[in-house]
Amino acid sequence: MFEIKDVLETNRMITENNLDVRTITMGISLRDCAHPDIKVTAQKIYDKITKKAENLVKVGQELETELGVPIINKRVSVTPIAIVGESCEAQSFVPLAKALDDAGKTVGVDFVGGFSALVDKGYTNGDRRLIASIPEALAETQIVCSSVSVGSTKCGINMDAVAEMGRIVKQTADLTADRDAIGCAKLVIFCNAVQDNPFMAGAFHGVTEPESVINVGVSGPGVVKHALEAVRGADVGTVAETIKKTAFKITRVGQLVAQEAARRLNTQFGIIDLSLAPTPAVGDSVAHILEEIGLESTGGPGTTAALAMLNDAVKKGGLMASSYVGGLSGAFIPVSEDAGMIAAVERGSLTLEKLEAMTCVCSVGLDMIAVPGDITAQTISAIIADEAAIGMINNKTTAVRLVPVPGKNVGDRVEFGGLLGYAPIIGVSKFKPDAFIARGGRIPAPVRSLTN
């Protein structure tokens, strides 16, 4: 039974510590929209999204008002478009991206995810056309997000796809150069992609998902930092316990919103993703949590250990709060979206190599990192391969969202705006991986894939 102090504590979390529901994401199956004529497919996609999600934004706004909990984004994710467009006779899937964009704008959501392909083990014809369409699709749409899965623990890593995605990232940057390569901020390359992820840019509606579903992503780095301020000087066991209890409370708020949203939208409740997702706002930073734990600056010695403890405690607290925890769930470290991470890069404590080490113990991977515009496609591919290897060997989701900004170099800064924030350009190794990437083929799945 809730007591008045619990209500007051939750109110303080919202008003003082930036607790919010980061996203309500409606997943929608588009498997019944396939047709040989791409114009027919595009129309069916538009019609289905606008019908299924017509009340999503309205319900989100109602819940914000009634519960007093900020809901930052309302989003839609769909069946990977490579699957939906497979039967289309057209060579380009850009019309399908435009249909997603138009439908999303009609229902008023912030993003639509699922212009995606899953090529862990190899390509189909639909996968090839989808991937080739990504640069133009992201340049010509505003709210469409794209993702490509290039590997998994079960399948290994598709190095042909890794090599191609390096080129695709560069092409996307070039086509959106007038907007500081914003297209790349809407493109994620995965290993062990998750089918019920509500967070962009990597959300898609997996083939094992129902006809439609509501997945909710909660947040609250500021709440965790505030809780840790009360245990300064305590041992790390106390720190972990404090994080766990706080994550429990955050997740319960998300559970309430998710269940009520699903009921009002007459659809299924899927999962709560309890990730600590930062924003550029002051007081909403994962880096500042790590520094509250005792680091002088995020990226310095001790960072990986502190982040591992944070990530684990968040998961433990969330699992006690909901029976349906899914998505990515943990602590995100997107550089441009976290004021503390930005500051750590600027003061020199946080480098690309340290970020890679940190991704071994947290959610996702190298996220929203701006790099010099003259980086080669092969170097991008090698960074993708490194991150995919971490995911494959450790049986965890990893991803890369690099933004090579044309005309920008180390020491410059790029502004993305909104939740995407701003970022200093991070240096990249000058040593070339070209011969390795040119080999192609598939890195075999590791021994741990043999679990049957």
Image (cartoon, rainbow, N blue to C red):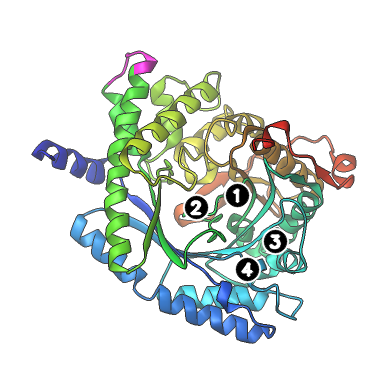
User: Can residue 158 be seen?
Assistant: yes
| Point 69% across, 83% down: residue | 36
Residue type, numbered disc 3: Thr
Residue type, numbered disc 1: Ala
Tell me if residue 236 is in the magenta stretch: yes
- Mark 2 and mark 3 lie on one chain; the one further toward the N terminus is 3
Front: mark 2 or 3: 2
- Mark 1 and mark 4 lie on one chain; the one further toward the N terminus is 4
Question: Residues at badges 2 and 4 in contact (C-beta under 8 Å)?
Answer: no
The range drawn in magenta is 231-237
Residue 436 percent coordinates (x, y) = 87, 40
Residue type, numbered disc 2: Asn
What quarter of the picture does the C terminus occupy?
top right
Q: Which residue is mark 2?
A: 197
In the picture, measured across the screen, residue 88 lies left or right of residue 54, that is right
Other-residue count near label 1 (Cα within 10 Å), few / some / many at <14 / 14–19 / ≥20: many
Q: CA distance from mark 4 to mark 3?
A: 18 Å
Question: Residues at badges 4 and 3 in contact (C-beta under 8 Å)?
Answer: no
| Point 80% across, 41% down: residue | 443
Q: CA distance from mark 1 to mark 4?
A: 15 Å
Other-residue count near label 2 (Cα within 10 Å), few / some / many at <14 / 14–19 / ≥20: many
Q: Nearer the viewer, residue 37 or 282?
A: 37
- Image mark count: 4
Q: Secondary structure at mark 1?
A: loop
Question: Residues at badges 1 and 2 in contact (C-beta under 8 Å)?
Answer: yes
Q: Which residue is mark 3?
A: 172
Q: CA distance from mark 2 to mark 3?
A: 23 Å
